[in-house]
Each structure stands twice: as structure tokens, then as C-alpha cells.
Image (cartoon, rainbow, N blue to C red):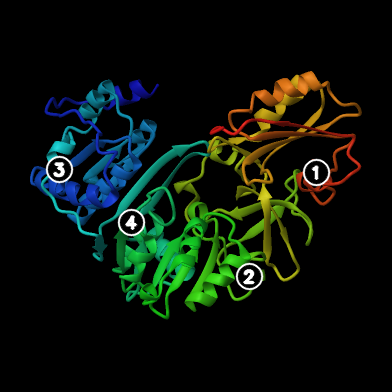
Amino acid sequence: MIIQQLQFLANTNPHKLALQDDLWHLTYQELYKKVIGVAETYAQNIDRETGIVIINVKSMALKWVLILAFRSKGYSTVTVSDLNLLVDLKLSDVVALFHEGLTDDLILLLDKIVPDALIIKFSSSDLNNFEVPDDLVLDSRWGGHIEYTSGSTGNYKTVLRPGIETKLLIDRAISEFHITPESIFYFGSFHPGTAVGNKVPLACFYLGVTCIFSQRPSFIDGLGHSNADRTFITPVLVRDFLTITDAQKTLRKDLKIFCGGGFLDSALAMSIKSKLSCSIFINYAATECGVALQNEIHTEEDTVWISPIPSKTIKIFDEQLNEVEINREGFLSIQLEQCDPKSYMNDELTSHDSFHQGFFHTGDIAIKRADGKIRVIGREKNVINLGGDKKAVEPIEAMLNRSLGVNNVCVFSLQDESGLPSMTIVVEASTSPSDELLTGIARQFGDFFSKVNFHILPLFPVQLSGLMKVDRKEILKKINQENLLRTFNIKFKAKND
């Protein structure tokens, strides 16, 4: 169908070059400085009114650096990850089209659809004559950007150009990250798939706010040598602040540290706060929905019970999609953004499990208390760490159910007494499976864990507060008690023995 649609729009234009992405090993800054020079060269061959640049890149990093490069030269850009969406594009008002995963056949078809386009071949040899500074500072107001994407939630588009959508983006950034035109935002790296690497910098560009994208080996060192008054980090980077030296304590007193990307340890956050005497904020859902929950951290409780952003509507649903009562567990959901529904909604999207009743389903389980603050308890979809690769536990548990001939199995990845990764398999059964069967199953995971523990429970506890499902937290508590039906451990030799 897609080929027919493209052929229907076809014209002729043979003057194209193939494209190759072999820049994956470069840092974001190196990419930007190198690509900007190439963009200057190719920009001479592009009509700003009607010309289109088609660049085929597999690397998300390279794609976004290319977008920044062309936008810095005054060009608008479009990204497309689903060729079906090309049929609906009005290409007269854009001058750069970026697409991932183009085959030779599709490039030929695109040649016919967009006869004014120039398909560029980038290679490392083209980009070796540019110097890369320690920090790249961007502070210009750049042109519009349209992003078309397609994923498991269906097709949608985000329009970032002068108008109501841009105003929403800017208003959100001002509100959620306390941005002013005088702000200086510091980013330890430019990662385009996150709020840090995409939405916040774009809002900064529109506002004329200075952004520093640093590639220094030490995040703390780079921040200490900058005059930034705000930064966005993940919980992993929070620990780096514990190593800060007296020489690095030159951070601005009004520095605001926004932490997102997961749970933040309360004691660690308080230790950092007392050491730096600056503002630390905890954010939730910054990538998917801007920021949905945010607290400035004053006490340990601020990292646990988090306040909804005033502009966001957040509800907690049970499995029947009914809103649960106060202090009852349920699925945390965030109302979709208040803009033209046609720009991101369709039947395919709204029918997906991640969306219901106009809300985005985050996949987290949470509780709301009477004052409106929310505590995120954990993931609905649990994962297990297999050799550094996180895998969903559901398929593994289903396999173990079949192998053991039982109805319920819960799998956890924990640590043993020595701090080494261990696996705990809890089985709901009235009688224990044979030692031979348990040993055979344990050996399947011997490459990933130092020890596999089996615990047999006659009956799994069930959540009674909204979800009516196996209570994994209570199971973890029970395996430390003495009244288990049986415990069976298999220990493997350490890899360096």
C-alpha cells in the first residue's frame, strides 16, 4: 500500500546521491561541529523556499545533530519515521526532511515525490576538518520544526513552529523548568530521546536562552566551570555530586538541579542538598508528558510524595478504568496535552493499551493521598536484569509456569550477601517440585546470577486496594519469614574462580 501511495505521487528527478551513516562513534559535539560545516556547503545548493534535504540516518544522535545544524542556518526541518505520513505532508513550507531507514528503492520513490530534494551522503572523511570545543554553546532563536513519528501508540505529530503549539511548549518549559530569557541551561550530554535532549533545549532555543552541551569527561567538572544556573540530570549523576571537591564548589548559589529518569534516593538527595546548598527538584514523566509531577526537595518526604504540575490532570485508575479512591493503589495516568486533538489523535492511538479515556497510561502503579500528592510505588511491568539487559518478567514467569506445572510464579533479581546478582523464584504450590526439576531450571540462569533461590508458598498474597492482582511486595516480605513451605538454593561458582 505504501509503495502504491508513493508511486501515485511520483515525478522524475534522477539527480540524487545515496546516503551512508558511519558517524556513530563520534560524540554529539563532534557531530555538530562537523555537520554544521557540511550543512553550510550544501545550503548553497538549496532553495530556502522550495528545497528539501533528505538525509537517511539510523543514528538518533546524528539525526538530531543534523536537525540542529540545518536549523542554525535558518532552515525549517521535518522528521518522519513512517513513510505513510509522507502522503499527508505539505512539503511547500519546509526545506529539510530527515528520514530513518530508507532503502534504495524508497529513495528512488522519494526522488520522484520531492524532485527539488537533495539527498546527501555523509561520511567521516567529509567531516575531519572541524575543531571541537570542550563546550558547545547555543543561544540563537531557531526556525520551526515539525516531528512526525509512529510507534506502538499509533501515529501522531508534534508541531514546533511559531503559533499556539510553540507557545504551549514555551509556557510548559517556563513553568516546569523555571526558565527565563536570562537562564543558562547546562546539559552533560545531548541525548535526543529524552526531555533533556529534545523538548527543553527546543524551548530554550525559541526563548533565546543559552544552552551549554558539554562533552567533558566529568559532569561535575563541566558544571563547575560553567556559569549555568540550572541543569537536568538523572539519578545516576546525582551520586557524582558526592565526589565534588572544594575547587568545584564554584556553582552559582541560585543553581537549580532538576532530577528525572527514575526514583531518587531520599537520603542521598538530602546529603547532596546539604553539601551544595542549592535547589534540587525531582521530576516525573519529563520525557513523555513534559513534567507531570514535581517537587522542590526540602525534606525526605518530598522525594516520595510528589505534587502534580498545576497544568496537568492526573488520575489513578483500576483495571476497569474507574478512578480509584484516595489512598488506594491504581494505574497512574496523565491527561493528554491540551491542544488540537487532530494533531496527535486517531483511532489506532486511542485504542492502544497506553491510552484510555483521553489519558496516557504510564505503566506505573501509584497512590494519591488527600492533599493531592502522589507516591509512585513501582512498575506495572516488572523487569529482571539478565547480564545487564533488562527483560520483562512476564514471558520468563510464563515459561516457568509451564515448566513447573503451576499457576503462579514470581521472579525477582536481587543481590546475595556479597552484593552479587542473585535470582529469586517464588512458586505458588501446595507441594514442592522435585529437586531435579528445580536444579535444571536454575542452571538456565547460571550465566547471569551467582545464586538462584526457590521459595515455595502455598498461596500468593493478592492486592485488595484497587487492582486485585498478585502483591509482589508482600511476596518479597514473606520470603524472609520462617513459615515458608520450602526454600531451595543453588549456588554457582563465581566467574573468576
Q: Secondary structure at mark 4?
A: loop
* Mark 4 nearby-residue class (10 Å; few <14, some 14–19, many ≥20): few
Task: State whether residue 122 is above or below residue 76.
Answer: above
Q: CA distance from mark 2 to mark 3?
A: 48 Å
**Residue beneath disc 2:** 302
**Residue beneath disc 4:** 217
- Select label 4 or label 2 by which is in front: 4
**Residue beneath disc 1:** 475
State the image coordinates of residue 199 (x, y, percent, origin top left).
Answer: 40, 57
Q: Secondary structure at mark 3?
A: helix
**In contact (CB < 8 Å): disc 2 and disc 3:** no
- Select label 1 or label 4 by which is in front: 4
Q: Earlier in the sequence, mark 2 or mark 3?
A: 3
Q: Residue at x 59, y 32 (%)?
A: 448
Hey, what amino acid is under mark 1? Ile
Residue at the front extreme of this rendering: 497
Q: Residue at x 32, y 76 (%)?
A: 182
Hey, what amino acid is under mark 2? Asp
Q: CA distance from mark 1 to mark 2?
A: 28 Å
* Mark 1 nearby-residue class (10 Å; few <14, some 14–19, many ≥20): some
**Residue beneath disc 3:** 127
In the rendered structure, the answer to whether residue 260 lies left or right of residue 170 reads right
Hey, what amino acid is under mark 3? Leu
In the rendered structure, the answer to whether residue 275 lies left or right of residue 480 reads left
